[in-house]
Image (spheres, helix red, strand yellow):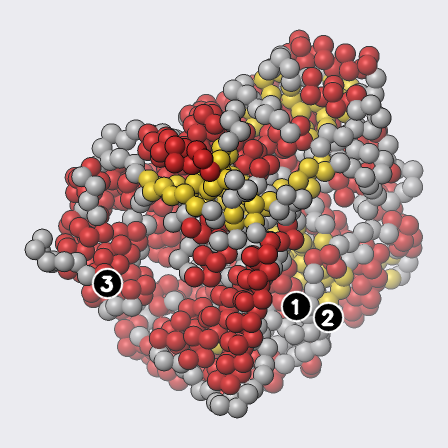
Amino acid sequence: MERVVLLDTSAIIYRAFYANPHFRTKKEPTGAIYGFTLILQKIIKEFSPKMIGAAFDVSRSTLKRTESYSEYKAQREAAPEDLIAQIPRIEELLDYYGIAKFKIPGHEADDVLGTLGKQLSEQGYEVIIITGDKDISQLICDEKNIKIALLGKGDGKDPFKILEKNEDVVESLGVLPCQIPDFFGLIGDSSDGIPGVRKIGPKKAIPMIEKYENLEGIYENIEFLTEIPGIGKSLIQNMIEDKELAFLSRKLATIEVDLEEIKVTGEELVFSENKEKLREFFTELEFKAMIKKYDENSSSSLFKAGEKFEKKSEEKENLDDKQIFINYDKYKKIVVDSEEIYELLKSEIDREKKIVFYLDEIGCSISTSKTDFYIPNVKKSDDVVESPKIGNLSLLTLDFTSDNNKEKEWFVNLFENEYEVVGFNLKTLCHYTKSELVNEKSFDMLIAYHLLTSSTKDEIELFAKEYTGVEFEKFNQLYSKRAVSELSAEEIIKYITPRSRVIYETEEYLRKRIEHEELEIVLNTIEMPLISVLAQMERDGIKIDIEHFRKLSKEFNYKLDEIREQIYLEAGAGEKKEFNINSPKQLAEILFVDLGMPILKKNKTGPSTDVEVLENLRDLGFKVAELLLEHRKLSKLTQTYVDPLPKLVDINSRIHSSFNQIGTATGRLSSSNPNLQNIPVKSDEGLRIREGFVADKEKKLIGIDYSQIELRVLAEMTQDENLILAYRENKDLHEITARKIFGVNESEAVTREQRTIAKTINFSLIYGKTAFGLAKELKIPQKDASTYIKTYFEQYPKVKVFEQETIEYAEKHGYVKTLFGRKRGIEGINSRNRNIKMQGERMAVNTVIQGTAAEIIKKAMIDIYNEIKEKTDIKLILQVHDELIFEVDEKKAETYKKQLEEFMKKCVEFKYSKLDVNGSIASNWGETK
């Protein structure tokens, strides 16, 4: 995930100025400029962003918030003249760095940051906001890719404090991110002139918010506030009298995230230093230390300062010490450009009986105990040979620079002896060589890193920083916008050989960590063998019927036009009223102002129009809400699947999705580019999309999915007699649960509605759903939901015991384990905040059940692949959660279906429960169920 850094520029300038208030050169105040530059350089070094944007405050007299409250920020003193004089210089500095500036009349920098953050995170970027204000952390609430980096003292030395999770914000402010506006609604903010409620500070506000969530909840339960220690009748009287101020204060403290003046893409924020201008700028201001950095004769180091250390020998065996320091300069760097050099490389590999390599689109490097070798593999022109598109990446084959492809032959020959193979993302090796070079001696550092940390990132730069302290610069940071073909071998060596070296030097440590954490079984029997399976699935792909999707596009777009017209008529109460349906602001005005619908929930910008709100409005009988839900669903499917899929096919009309082995913390596989796992299963539209995935000529698709696998895992792990009996005797578990909950005896039939409710309960309660949550899902009174839950645990008593034991284990150890030994750290499990702790408890139980189920499916994939990989009449082409899809010769479909069903049932032998599957044969994916 590419990273964008957003600067709260005005806050940084103030911090820098007061850290260096008397700093002057040539009788010109420059303390703010100097401090700002130090902080900016620290930011670039610390976060290595490709993109940066700088947000500025505007004059208070223009702020729209003053229209709501004239005293807003009125008490603030004017900025010192010395500081104001330096702002144009800082803007000039940003121009020389190539950093985009944002200043929106009427809006504060916080609103600009909120809007930029939302837009960029929705585009898939990781957003880091640099600020000195904790209240900006409210942006973490909805945008999962947004992090807040709080500034230190402003001298460029203090590290940043990163806020990225709910518990980080709770630790800092005492409330959840999305509760921050409510928090300031109560306590106010004297620095901004926000009034709040008289005599309420953080100590009184936090317990109120923790118990009732927001201002609406607090005021709805105001008569019960005296139950909270420290809240007396006089304080409640203040709250009643200041209610209007409380809600106004919340509005003032809420950051806007939908400014219409801002529309930006990540590419617009790519920055590039103008070194000549920066050198002139720093020379003029006499910043001597900074001049040296941009001096034409100074060599830019590959690494950031401070990473070249030798690890003390006595520290090497300390598994708690993650830092392994490497002296990169002591190893020879050699380009493999002749037979003689190749023989040298081969002799070193033969001696060590191990190949440690790094491979990407830039090149390939191999490290031995003494030497780092670089094998050039990219043509000097753009006509590189491509394999089929896998995901959104056209993977380069090993098409090397020499005319006779000698280097490719050299590289492949290195693997003839089946030596130990060590790399970072070995699936890449399978794709580049179009062969299965992963063997039982292989060790994938990326997979090991994932198992040890639950990280879902696949960047070697993060891995290197985690275990060595080295901050690698990415290729585009080293060489800006230069093409690979313009670089010499020596320049590419600077980029690529440290990557294979860090793999070489950390391998032993990671192997010991895997052993120490008892992760060998899941690594060696599940994850490593799965690499070849996924690589082959990605290469084979699945065929789509392009004409089917063209027709579907016309059909869906016609439906969208019809729905849109109906929405316009509803919006105008019978007369057509057009507006931007995709604009939350315009939609809210139509629903809650023009049509007078009740406001059910508010977010940072006003009344919410999210799915939950629309569903509730639909249930209240508002037809336009139902139309809006239908429009959103159909629009998303059209934009995500129907229109894009035909553009992603290869010459054989096949789609090649990426299956991400480290994409989830629970161990489930994820799919991307395109994400085939998110196609709806139950809707008619989802079925129509699946019908477009077809078998090739004279082929059939076989679909086999595990029946209730997570509930069967639950039965095995809880050893609950009633669960085990149901599965051993092939009974309908949902019917059994329905009979118990609704008191239906054996002589009576269970209704469809009763079974549906029982099914929801069976799947909900194993993940810790509360009575409140169940009532909301089933749309029943909370009292009834509580009764259902009580009855459920009476029927399956060991489920409750299992859940409690799992939670206690997580509280004690900080993690939980699956059946195969995968570990996942459980954040917030010991939090004092009730909401965060409950979230951690649900995560703990979910991980054990869902993670074990995921490993069973992976085991089935491996066993089947080993059986069929030499065959030409059957391929495993798709995995979607509990379902596997195969493409087979139509004449052998029935035979293979029976064999595959048996393989999947027996891949893991349960002691108490048992696995079962449902299989089908069809011409397209939609017909497999």
Q: Which dot, 3 or 1, sits closer to the camera?
A: 3
Residue drawn at the location 31% of the way across and 75% of the way down: 221
Q: Nearer the viewer, residue 153 or 671?
A: 671
Residue behind mark 1 = 112
Which amino acid type is shown beneath numbered disc 2?
A: Lys
Residue drawn at the location 19% of the way across and 61% of the way down: 751
Residue drawn at the location 57% of the way across and 69% of the way down: 557
Q: Can residue 828 be seen here?
A: no
**Quadrant in which residue 643 is drawn:** bottom right
Whichever of callouts 3 and 2 sits on the residue coming sooner in the sequence is 2
Indicate the secondary structure of the residue bearing disc 2: loop
Q: Are marks 1 and 2 in contact (CB under 8 Å)?
A: yes
Q: Could you say which disc has been placed on residue 103 in the image?
A: 2
C-alpha separation, residue under disc 3 versus residue under disc 2: 57 Å
Residue 713 in picture, x, y percent from top left:
30, 39
Whichever of callouts 3 and 1 sits on the residue coming sooner in the sequence is 1
Q: Can residue 123 be seen here?
A: yes
Residue 348 in picture, x, y percent from top left:
70, 12
Mark 3 packing: few (<14 Cα in 10 Å), some, or many (20+)?
A: few
Residue behind mark 3 = 753
Mark 1 packing: few (<14 Cα in 10 Å), some, or many (20+)?
A: many
Which amino acid type is shown beneath numbered disc 3?
A: Glu
